[in-house]
Amino acid sequence: MNILVVDHSKVFRALWKRLVANAGHEPIMVDDGAEGLSVLKSRHVDLVCVSLTLPDMDGVEFCRQARAMRAGRSVPLIVLTSTEDKQARMQAFEAGATDIHPKTDIEELFNQASRFVEENDNRVSGRVLYVEDSSVVAHVMLRILEGMGLRVDHFKSAAEAFQAFEPETHDLVISDILVEGEMSGMGLVSKVREAYPDKARVPILAMSGMDDSTRRVELFRLGVNDFISKPVIEEEVISRVSNLISNKQLFDQVQSQRRHLYDLAMIDQLTGLYNRNSLAEFANKAFSEANRHDFPLSLILVDIDHFKKINDTHGHLNGDAVLAAVGELLRDSCRSEDFAVRFGGEELMLILPHCELEDAEQRGEQLRREIETLKPSGITITGSVGVTARPRGTRVSMEDLFRVADQAVYKAKEAGRNKVFAVAAESAAGETVAG
């Protein structure tokens, strides 16, 4: 970035030159207003810092002349001052200054200038759904948006745009509110917000040639994030679009990090199954609903036979491969309402809502046969499987069923392993469910 500093102080210019260069930007140092305006006219400049007092003119006049130049219309102008003169500051803003900053705090001044430079970097990445039936306006907007580095899906019809809308891939929706067709732009906003109410997840930028404050309030109530009046100003479009997309993508990053942290807390990283931490959230809810509505619920406990021997003989890496393979098998066997849990060590558990004991026993037998054919890392493995189910009309906890299933696994091992034992859970019955 090219940063132009207009100041008569050699010491100040030297400090700024070092700060700008160290930050990786290009410093352009001049000591009077005329030379600064000449540079602005002849070179590309991304930011101007100009002193309020100069040898040939003051900073207010510099701003006024810079804004009158084509090259200076959109460049951020920071006026540097050592005075608290409110009148002078007001005059600077009226002349077109972007901001006014005291010269005394050079480090803070530089940080602020850096932010202006960062905000002036117009390139962003992302995909925009754009609705506009005017070819003239669309031509201007497409030039701006594509010039920012954005991919744009342009539609003249709001209805067609809604059909093509993909919340997982579109970072922003931009729509004129008065497009032709059966669905207006306002209708599109309403449809999008009805389907995706989270404004941070799917930002919407509305556009209109009618500067009607009532209509604008209605749009914000419908759920738009921002609004632009026509005819559009390129710098305004760039700033508003950049802010909306950057905030949306930052939100996506935060959500992704939250999901990752959730997975770390609730998912066993080796098997991909839920871990014991998850039982309080998922299992308790499943058992509570089964007890309340008296519907069937079964539990399958799988214990990998001779797992310690597998670790001792083949090494822990191969032991991990065995666990991962059996965990994948359990995950693949689950219905949407089932919970597969690594309860501990080589013990893996399935909680099966709406599943009777007989059906659970068949599931257990199928798992036993599939485990026998897995051969992870070339190792032949088997599993002892215990199955039980919630007795109808009786309140039970997960701990109740686990105890019965654990006893069933023990019987399977006593019978020579690689067996399925199903045990009714009447012995675990607690209080009776009111009929």
Image (cartoon, helix red, strand yellow):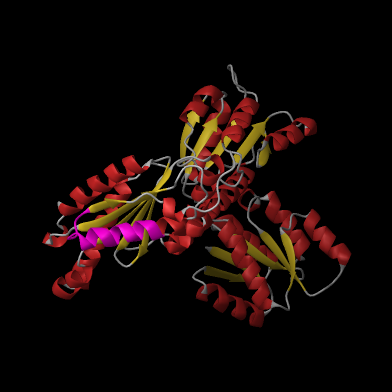
Instruction: State the residue at coordinates (53%, 23%).
Output: 159
Towards the viewer: 312 or 297: 297
Q: Is 90 situated left or right of 368 in this image?
A: right
Q: Is 344 situated left or right of 307 in this image?
A: right
Towards the viewer: 279 or 431: 431
Instruction: State the residue at coordinates (13%, 62%).
Output: 379
Identify the magenta region: 403-419
Towards the viewer: 124 or 218: 218
Instruction: State the residue at coordinates (87%, 65%).
Output: 86
Image location (x, y in percent) of residue 391 = 45, 46
Q: Does the magenta stretch include residue 410?
A: yes
Q: Quadrant of the C terminus?
A: top right
* Magenta part, dominant SS: helix
Asked if residue 174 can be seen in this view, the reply is yes
Above or below — where is 18 with respect to 156? below
Residue 260, quarter of the rendered image = bottom left
Image location (x, y in percent) of residue 216 = 74, 34
Towards the viewer: 115 or 42: 115
